[in-house]
Image (cartoon, rainbow, N blue to C red):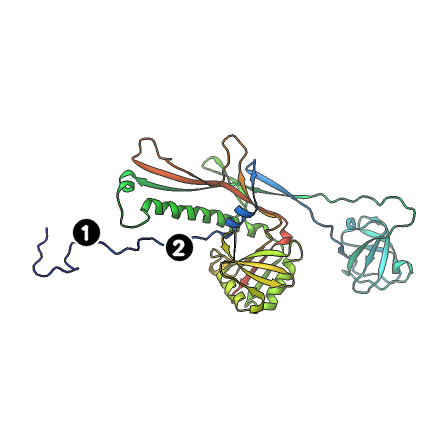
Amino acid sequence: MATVTGQRTTGNVAANQRIIDLSEKVLRLEPDASPLCVITKRLSKSQTTNVTFRWAETERTTRFDAVNNGAGYNTTDTSIVVDTGTLFSANDLVKVPRTGEVFSVTSVSTNTLTVVRGNGTGTGVAIVDNDPLYIIGKAEEEGGTAATARAVDPTFTDNYTEIFKRSVEISGSAGSEVQWTSPHDWQLQHEGEAIEHMVDIENAFLFGKPASVTLDSKPARYTGGALHFATQNGVSAGGTLTEAGFETFLRGAFRYGSNNKTLFASPLLVSVLNNFSQTKLQTSVGDNTYGVSVQKWISPHGTVNIVKHNLLEGATWGGYGILLDLGRGNVKYRYLAGGPLGSRDTKLYRNRQAPDRDGQLDEWITECGLQFGESKTHGVLSGVTG
């Protein structure tokens, strides 16, 4: 026991006697760090009855093809080889955009078209290799029979539910004592791990790659994320992003799908867009979508809901923007459910500790995955440095 002679000061009072001035509320860093998960959970959420879930996609048949003959064709040639003969059928009218000529198809053999040049006039225009061809549609004769039916098979894509877990544990003594801070450390750890649990899911929904593997001799699965499936409409700024460059990106990404999409943008990209024409940015205090603050960029191609995403950071992802068409149900939060044990959507399971443990262990568990359909309706902007 120390003896103090003279005046008592903060320097010689025993440390355990002093109350440290802590903020009563411990502030949380990034409480809203999972906007994609938040929006899809509230906007487009459905159960899957199997750990592997599949969706079917169809799209309009393309009408563009090209000539495939190195020597090209003169004005009267009537046999024309193309890249994809299955796109054509008898009575199709086909336009050559470069020359303006329209010819009609009389028959198709593999990739060779037999045609009538010059739209029935017999006068064509010379065609070169790789000339684009556009299928206008069919022109049928009077009194004819029904057109030959044509159908396109859907394509199927798989993804998996992933098991996400986070735990908090405390001894009986630590959980029973009074603490200076508020909330109590037990509640604080609960809140923190709940946020990290959602961030784990968010990271998978952004960066994950689908796989079915074995861990510790047991099956495990990884869910694929947006960057894995969004293989269309990728544009790299390759440095400084201009307003014209951003409009070019939007032109491609809005070609298909709805005219209202959501851009999950890195903080850097948000700053860049904020420096563009202010007439195109619309912001109102408190404007939010399902609890996530947004700005709107108004483009002739469509409306972009801009959501700042702080997980898009670092040397690579710090220059990213992920544009998603969320309004058509293409992007869904899928959780495992349907069996006798019920839903595997996010739940907190209390008292997971061994029966003889003096303390408590609580665990967050979610088994879910991302459905990401119609890649052509989305887009990824990358390589933005300023």
Q: Amino acid at mark 2?
A: Leu
Check disc 2 and report its element: helix, strand or loop.
loop
- As rendered, which of 183 and 50 lies closer to the eye? 183
* x, y percent for residue 129: 78, 61
* x, y percent for residue 242: 57, 68
Mark 2 in CB contact with mark 1 (< 8 angstroms): no
**Residue at point 42% right, 55% down?**
30
- Furthest toward the front, the residue is 285
38, above or below 118, in the image: above
User: In the visual, does 181 lie left or right of 237?
Assistant: left
- Which numbered dot is residue 29? 2
* x, y percent for residue 206: 52, 51
Instruction: Find the distance from the CA under tag 2 to the CA under tag 1.
Output: 29 Å
Q: Amino acid at mark 1?
A: Asn
237, above or below 136, in the image: below
- Which numbered dot is residue 16? 1
**Residue at point 63% right, 60% down?**
302
